Image (cartoon, helix red, strand yellow):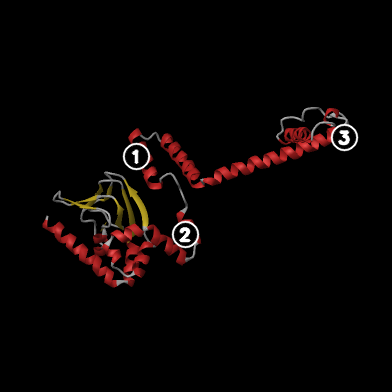
């Protein structure tokens, strides 16, 4: 009101609006009631109403700003929350330091600082979209692997949709000789050693696969396989392996040819 601050009556419009802005911001930011205390009851109630509205707007602004910041990189936040649980788990069980370090390195290489519920995301998409994404994600594997490069595209898609991504650290035994085999593996990136009874090592790297002998013969593993570097692999379970190859018998023969060649080399050793 004009009688509250009489000195503003003859001031310039810039000073008048500056004072009004200061008064409004004081209310909205909950830091006071302006430069001068309200005098009449009308002023008191108007000031309280103004402060309540300002406090509500301020709380809404803070809430929206916080939600926006969290949503900017929700996958990284989800990873950090998950890893905090892992750290608490390791501390609770008093795991040794070297084991904790290996677990930390595994999480870093497996998730690379971001975590998604990939199965749920892909499960919500239509089959054509899901197949398109999987083919794109596995494009390097397909390009490096002669088995896939020369195969029927329908067979490749059928195989890729059943693969499961896995990471192994240097020194990990991916397969142990004499165990029952339930998976075979395709190497996207990394180097593994096939260890036979004769202590001879055979190296396999990007674009190779292993573990198919056991799935074809339904026997036990004929050799051990150890990761020499960090290995990014795709695994295929025995049930999915047989399900796909029932539809593509020619591809079963291709697997059998490689398997027989490997069995012959193992036998010679």
Q: CA distance from mark 2 to mark 3?
A: 61 Å
Q: Position of residue 103 (x, y in %)?
A: 37, 40
Question: Which residue position holds label 3?
Answer: 42
Q: Which mark is residue 102?
A: 1
Label 3 SS: helix
Q: Position of residue 82 (x, y in %)?
A: 47, 43
Residue at point 81%, 31% (across, down): 11
Question: Which residue position holds label 2?
Answer: 122
The answer to whether residue 180 is left or right of residue 56 is left
Q: Residue furthest left?
A: 268
| Position of the N terminus by quadrant | top right
Quadrant in which residue 28 is drawn: top right
Crowding near the residue tagged with mark 2, few <14, some 14–19, many ≥20 C-alpha atoms within 10 Å: some
Label 1 SS: helix
Q: Of circles 3 and 1, which is in front?
A: 3
Lower sequence index among marks 2 and 3: 3
Q: CA distance from mark 1 to mark 2?
A: 30 Å
Q: Nearer the viewer, residue 178 or 2?
A: 2
Lower sequence index among marks 1 and 2: 1
Q: Position of residue 163 (x, y in %)?
A: 36, 59
Crowding near the residue tagged with mark 1, few <14, some 14–19, many ≥20 C-alpha atoms within 10 Å: few
Crowding near the residue tagged with mark 3, few <14, some 14–19, many ≥20 C-alpha atoms within 10 Å: few
């Amino acid at each position: 009101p004009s009688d509250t601050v009489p000195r503003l009556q003859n001031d310039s419009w810039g000073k008048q609006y500056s004072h009004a802005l200061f008064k409004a911001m004081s209310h909205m930011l909950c830091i006071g009631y302006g430069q001068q205390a309200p005098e009449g009851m009308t002023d008191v109630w108007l000031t309280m109403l103004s402060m309540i509205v300002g406090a509500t707007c301020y709380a809404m602004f803070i809430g929206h700003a916080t939600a926006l910041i969290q949503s900017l990189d929700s996958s990284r936040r989800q990873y950090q929350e998950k890893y905090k649980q892992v750290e608490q788990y390791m501390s609770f069980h008093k795991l040794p330091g070297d084991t904790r370090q290996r677990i930390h390195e595994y999480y870093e290489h497996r998730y690379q600082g971001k975590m998604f519920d990939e199965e749920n995301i892909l499960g919500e998409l239509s089959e054509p979209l899901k197949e398109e994404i999987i083919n794109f994600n596995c494009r390097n594997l397909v390009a490096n692997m002669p088995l896939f490069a020369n195969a029927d595209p329908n067979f490749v898609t059928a195989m890729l949709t059943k693969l499961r991504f896995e990471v192994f650290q240097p020194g990990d035994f991916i397969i142990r000789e004499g165990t029952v085999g339930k998976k075979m593996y395709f190497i996207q990136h990394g180097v593994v050693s096939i260890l036979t009874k004769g202590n001879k090592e055979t190296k396999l790297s990007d674009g190779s696969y292993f573990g198919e002998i056991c799935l074809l013969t339904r026997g036990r593993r004929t050799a051990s396989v150890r990761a020499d570097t960090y290995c990014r692999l795709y695994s295929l379970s025995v049930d999915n392996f047989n399900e796909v190859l029932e539809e593509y018998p020619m591809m079963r023969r291709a697997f059998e040819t490689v398997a027989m060649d490997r069995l012959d080399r193992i036998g010679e050793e």
